[in-house]
Amino acid sequence: MLNPNHPDPERLSALASGDTDATADAALSDHVSTCEHCTALVEELGALRMSLADLPDLRPHRPLRLLPEVVEEPSRVDRLGGWARRIFAPVLTAGAALAMVGLIGTTVPALDNLGVGAGAEDAATEEGEVAATEEGEVAPDRAAPRADESGGAEPGALNYGGGAAAPTEAVMPLQSGRDLDGVTTGQLGDDADGERLSVETAAERSPWPMVLFTGVALMVAAALLRWILAPRSS
Amino acid sequence: MADPPAPTTGTRTQPLPDEAAVIARASGGDRMAFTQLMEHYQSACYGLAWRLLGDADQAADATQDAFIHAYRAMASYRGGIFRSWLLRITANASYDILRRQQRRPTSPLPDPEEGSPELPDLAAVNPVAEATRSEMYRHLERALARLPEDQRTAIVLCDVYGMDYNEVAAMTQSALGTVKSRIHRGRLRLRELLAEHRELFTR
């Protein structure tokens, strides 16, 4: 500021734009009203403001896309949808085939197990003794008489091993009562257990359940993908 | 500032005669209505972007970015002056580009002397008056381009496009006092730069 008697020019600019803090400043207004230099500066800055506010709009130097990428986004989804439609049938077929193979592979041993469990009551007793021998490693005093009573031990139980079976029976006293109700009841319960066990053991040693699972997963994935990417009218 | 943008024949784009109806249709997802709005206001948006960025291609990019943002925000548009709404979006899109470039806030636009815009003459109704106006605009644009970026941004948003201090402060993420100071210092600097052409700005 050349002349210390004049107010800060930025305050004069504030006055030119009508800022309330400047217009309410009595000292500033008083000075400007009596100072030709400051009055001229305020008017000049005001005129400059008006000229700036009059600057025209400018034409783009090249044509602009008015709906640029917004239009492309649905088309990308459409492309994905078309891709999903194309692979839907092959993937579904492959999944169904895999599932069928897996199902057959999984259910055939299970049917065999059912046949063994229902038809070989006498044999089951012998097998139960074998199971008891193995269970004996964990609970020798309980496993032997129980094996004689139940008569339902299965080849599956053999494979499963006594380590898990013995504690289960040890904490379930009802098991023996159920066994005493009759051969049929006992067999049904044991058959169900046996089937579950045989499936579990089959999962450890055979690929069929995994094949079945993979087939079903492929079918579900294909259906989901097609559903997600299907074009929808909004 | 190598590519000189052409001013429109008027000074500023006026609202469409049936703008409320067009906006309502665009808000409802009518793409033709949205395109009509963007076509109408593209010069307004491009002018703002060009003045903030000083580069024709970047200004075009910022304008198109703004159109995308506007398209997404169209359904949530809640009235007010549409032009101002769109210009705020454009200013944000332009400022995003500035931030991405991490330009020093005090740097002027490149080559302010040589590359300053050579604005073509306006469509002349009164040739003498239009020539004077055109001359004034040319000097103003050149002087604006020579301002430090922080001052130019504040002046462009506030004085050229009529945003208030609070809007400018929010947009530039600056304190209110800082914005005011930039505007006032920028005006005084502009006045110095235009000292030789003072007669053009006296009213």
Image (cartoon, coloured by chain):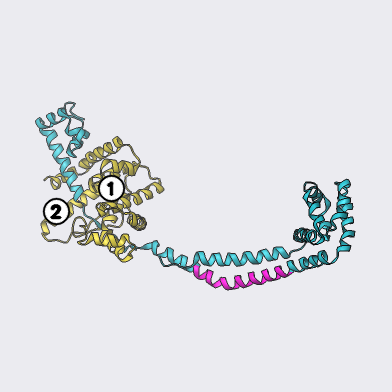
Chain colours: A cyan, B yellow
Residue at the spot of label 2: B132
Three-letter amino acid code of the residue under disc 2: Thr
Badge 2: few (under 14), some or many (20 or more) residues near its Cα, within 10 Å?
Answer: some
Viewer-nearest residue: A174 or B185? A174
Is A102 in the magenta?
yes
Viewer-nearest residue: B128 or B52? B52
First-in-chain label (1 vs 2):
2
Q: Chain letter of disc 2?
A: B
Three-letter amino acid code of the residue under disc 1: Ala
Q: Secondary structure at mark 2?
A: helix
Q: Residue furthest top?
A: A4
Is mark 1 in CB contact (under 8 Å) with mark 2? no
Q: Residue furthest front?
A: A181
Taking A202 as reference, is A11 left or right?
left
State the image quarter where residue B185 is shown: top left
Taking A180 as reference, is B3 left or right?
left
Residue B135 appears in the figure: yes
State the image quarter where residue B68 is shown: bottom left
Q: Secondary structure at mark 1?
A: helix
Q: Chain letter of disc 1?
A: B
Q: How many marks?
A: 2
**Region of the chain picked out in magenta, as a range:** A81-104
State the image quarter where residue B41 is shown: bottom left
Residue at (29, 41) in percent of width and height: B166
Which mark is on residue B145?
1
> Looking at the picture, how far across and down is residue A131, in whole percent?
86, 55
> Looking at the picture, how far across and down is residue B4, in whole percent?
27, 57
Residue B115 appears in the figure: no
Q: Vertical placement of A121 versus A18: above or below?
A: below
> Looking at the picture, how far across and down is residue A209, in whole percent?
71, 63
Q: Real-space Cα distance between discs 1 and 2?
A: 20 Å
